[in-house]
Amino acid sequence: QQQVKQSPQSLIVQKGGISIINCAYENTAFDYFPWYQQFPGKGPALLIAIRPDVSEKKEGRFTISFNKSAKQFSLHIMDSQPGDSATYFCAATMTSGGSNYKLTFGKGTLLTVNP
Amino acid sequence: EAGVTQSPTHLIKTRGQQATLRCSPISGHTSVYWYQQALGLGLQFLLWYDEGEERNRGNFPPRFSGRQFPNYSSELNVNALLLGDSALYLCASSSLDTDTQDFGPGTRLTVL
């Protein structure tokens, strides 16, 4: 059972454009939703994260939009740059009593930003 | 602050052999997580260790096992290797003060 569905599988945008990646989850116990960026040959690196008590979080060119009722969240990359070309993973987890449980990942989106 | 480190970077084994992968968490982090990233299968949770105890394991056979040492470093063992075990094995760590898991660079395991 795939608990986090991510789309699209791949995305090509022009430099300066907006990249949008969407995720949907099923488990309403999830309470922490991070996005990771992974370059070839490297481990995933945390990009930005959100909790369901806010509908939007912005950090620089990266914004997460969160819709709790629809159980959906998305990553927006404004002014996309060639250096943003990477694979992006959404994830979800439960955090309880200070413990951080396993991350459930989406399948990933390969983003290519053309110069 | 040093990040999560993993060794070796690459590991080549043949079918039926055993592989041992190592992970050192960020200083102060007590939880260690192992994930498998196989081609086409995404990132799948393997094991979670906290304070030396196995807290949870993913949908993997008992051939996959591990342990966490008193200094919070961890070891993943894969016995009776199969060709399908070829993957990037990622270790992550976290602490009670953080919501996030920080990942290491991974160990690329190739089974021939």
Image (cartoon, coloured by chain):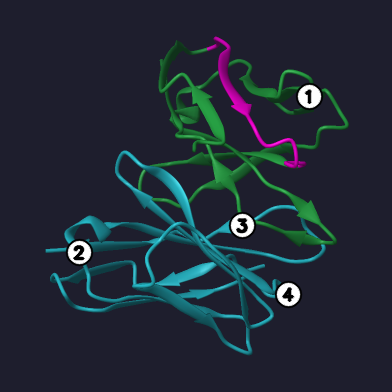
Chain colours: A green, B cyan
Please, what is the three-letter code of the amino acid marked with disc 3? Asp
Q: Which mark is residue B28?
A: 4
Q: CA distance from mark 4 to mark 1?
A: 33 Å
Question: How many C-alpha atoms fall within 10 Å of the one at disc 1: few (<14), some, or many (≥20)?
Answer: some
Q: CA distance from mark 1 to mark 2?
A: 41 Å
Q: Are marks 1 and 3 in contact (CB under 8 Å)?
A: no
Q: Are marks 1 and 3 on the same chain?
A: no
What element does badge 4 sit on? loop
Please, what is the three-letter code of the amino acid marked with disc 4? Gly
Question: How many C-alpha atoms fall within 10 Å of the one at disc 2: few (<14), some, or many (≥20)?
Answer: some
Residue at x 67% of width, y 37% of height: A27
Q: Which residues are magenta?
A: A16-31
> In the drawing, does residue B74 fall left or right of residue B86?
right
| Residue that mark 2 sits on | B82
Question: The numbered mark 1 sits on a residue in which chain?
Answer: A
- Is there any visible trace of residue B63 in the rendered image? yes
Q: CA distance from mark 3 to mark 2?
A: 28 Å
| Residue that mark 3 sits on | B102
Please, what is the three-letter code of the amino acid marked with disc 1? Lys
Residue A109 location in percent, x, y? 45, 28
| Residue that mark 1 sits on | A68
